[in-house]
Image: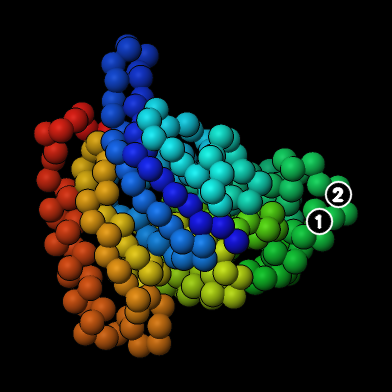
Amino acid sequence: MAGLEIVGAGLVYRGVDGRETVALAGVDLTVDDGESVCLIGPSGCGKSSLLELIAGLRSPTSGTVSIDGRPVAGPRRGTGYIPQGGGLLPWRDALGNAALGLVVQHVGRDAREAAARAALATVGLGDRVRSYPAELSGGMRQRLALARCLAADADVILADEPFSALDALTREQMQQVVLDLWRRLGYTQLMVTHSVEEACWLGQRIVVMTAGPGRVSAIVDNPGAGSDGWRSSPAFAARCAHVRTLLDEATRPSDRGVDA
């Protein structure tokens, strides 16, 4: 397993007109090995950009991002990334989508299919290996996106609003799937969400980001995450109220940079 460390990370985009947009400014964050952390903040605060830095899809314009003590210089074999929408390929069946990371890693066909089948079974899709994404429900598609990470034996999983398009019941079911898998497999997990309740249910710590340019505004310890009875407890309601207050404060526009 692996933890991650972000020190002073900044990210500036330059548009076609040459104008700069500051997406992230001086982000400091440490996620321990095997920890589940939820990232929440107003739209445009750089949450997705931060995940892309950790995934190695972008490079910070300042500061550093490290996993397991090693600087992230590009996509890392042990990092699983679930973008908004899941990132599934519609022309590949479930088996092909689950094996995609292993194809990129040049793993032999027999080995990658065996790993993909095992991952699909782990997420409850063992009987849908030949189904295409369009033939799967929203919850099943999210299970498939998770299976792609598990097949590649990811020790860090980054998820960008994975359940935002699901109905309320399916969303709760998928939250439980994620919780069970994380507990069983012990990987490090960082999830972006716009749902306060979801953050307080799944995150052992909740990171609140400011309005753009994105900075860490507050970090809330949440030791009750995922425990029996936590979601229905008065303490959970109080934690959600506290995070909402912090989020409201963080949403106020900053005069320290350009909106991202």
Asked if residue 136 lies left or right of residue 36, the reply is: right
Q: What crowding class fits label 2: few (fewer than 14 Cα within 10 Å), some (14-19), or many (20 or more)?
A: few
Image coords of residue 188 (percent x, y) = 52, 61
Element on which disc 2 rests: helix
User: Of the numbered discs in the image, which one, if any, rests on residue 113?
Assistant: 1
Asked if residue 240 lies left or right of residue 81, the reply is: left
Image coords of residue 196 (percent x, y) = 28, 64
**What residue is drawn where x is 23% and y is 73%?**
239
Q: Residue furthest top?
A: 17
Q: Nearer the viewer, residue 192 or 37?
A: 37
Element on which disc 1 rests: helix
Q: Nearer the viewer, residue 218 or 47?
A: 218
Q: Nearer the viewer, residue 57 or 161?
A: 57
User: Of the numbered discs in the image, which one, if any, rests on residue 109?
Assistant: 2
Image coords of residue 55 (percent x, y) = 52, 43
Instruction: Name the image quarter holding the N terminus.
Output: bottom right
**What residue is drawn where x is 86% and y is 47%?**
108
The chosen color scheme is rainbow
